[in-house]
Amino acid sequence: MGLSAAIAFSQLSKELFAGALANDMPIGFQTFPIRDVLSKDFPGTLKTMAGMGYKLVELCSPPGYKDIGFGFY
């Protein structure tokens, strides 16, 4: 994972995840902020994010995603 993405995700509080878990509320993330890393290793990046506690993924296809393999064809 890129340094900026790792720093951004590490800033989320452990209390946020603990509170969500205690209330059966899964935490998710959008792919856009980590698109560069995701384009290099899709399964590995998802595994990393799951290991950080994320349970949901919002995929999107903004302009430019097609160039890295995530667009409509």
Image: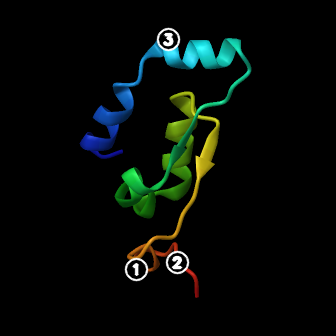
- Would you name the residue on which mark 1 appears? 67
Please tell me how crowded label 1 is: few (under 14), some (14-19), or many (20+) other residues with Cα within 10 Å.
Answer: few
Q: How far apart, in angstroms, are the residues tagged by discs 2 and 3? A: 35 Å
* Quarter of the image with the N terminus in it: top left
Amino acid type of the residue that numbered disc 2 sits on in the rendered structure: Gly
Q: Residue 59: x percent and y percent?
A: 57, 58
Snapshot quadrant of residue 5 = top left
Amino acid type of the residue that numbered disc 1 sits on in the rendered structure: Asp
Question: Left of 21 or right of it: where is 4?
Answer: left
- Would you name the residue on which mark 2 appears? 71
Mark 2–mark 1 CB contact (< 8 Å):
yes
Q: Residue 49: x percent and y percent?
A: 51, 38
Q: Residue at x 48, y 54 (%)?
A: 31
- Would you name the residue on which mark 3 appears? 15
Q: Which is nearer the N-term, disc 3 or disc 1?
A: 3
* Quarter of the image with the C terminus in it: bottom right
